[in-house]
Amino acid sequence: MYIGRSDTDLRRRILQHAAARRAEYFTYDVHHTAQHAFEVESSMYHSEQESLTNCIHPAAPKATRAQCPFCPPQVHATRTQRLLVPAAWSQ
């Protein structure tokens, strides 16, 4: 199973996957904002993570600072290459 999204051109994205023979069929949902699409994709990623062929966490929509609502803050910080420093360390 592969979960993904396109914030710009769904047709192109599906054709790329079809040409690569990534799957035998597909389904899609339409969301009215890239933020909502990201949240749904993240939800599906976390709920189906064990059976996915794509192991990379969904990226936030471009030009946003959206965070996955399903990841703990430390996981998100690690993915964005910034470790959270406990308050006690900064004193």
Image (cartoon, rainbow, N blue to C red):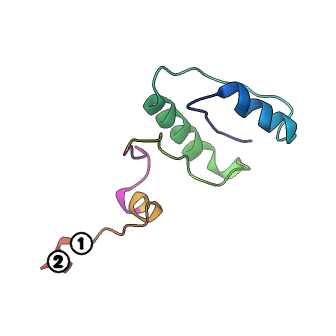
Residue corresponding to mark 1: 86
Task: Give the label on residue 90, or none.
Answer: 2
Instruction: Say which element carries label 2.
Output: helix
Instruction: Say which element carries label 1.
Output: loop
Instruction: Say above or below: 20 vs 40.
Output: below
Q: Position of residue 72 (x, y in %)?
A: 39, 55
Marks 2 and 1 in Cβ contact (< 8 Å):
yes
- Which quarter of the rendering shows the C terminus? bottom left
Q: Which of marks 2 and 1 is in front?
A: 2
Q: Dot 2, how many residues are within 10 Å of its Cα: few (below 14), some (14-19), or many (20+)?
A: few
Indicate left or right for 32 with 91 as reference. right
Q: Give the number of callouts.
A: 2
Asked whether 71 falls inside the magenta stretch, the response is yes
Tell me what residue is drawn at x 39 percent, y 43 percent: 66
Tell me what residue is drawn at x 71 percent, y 25 percent: 11
Indicate left or right for 75 with 10 as reference. left
The residues tagged by marks 2 and 1 sit, at their Cα atoms, a distance apart of 7 Å
Q: Where is residue 57 in the image (x, y as percent from the top left)?
A: 56, 51
Q: Dot 1, how many residues are within 10 Å of its Cα: few (below 14), some (14-19), or many (20+)?
A: few
Amino acid residing under circle 1: Pro
Tell me what residue is drawn at x 82 percent, y 28 percent: 25
| Predominant SS along the magenta part | loop
- Which quarter of the rendering shows the N terminus? top right
Asked whether 33 falls inside the magenta stretch, the response is no
* Magenta-highlighted residues: 65-74
State the residue in front, 72 or 20: 20
Q: In which quarter of the image is residue 69?
A: top left
Tell me what residue is drawn at x 79 percent, y 37 percent: 17
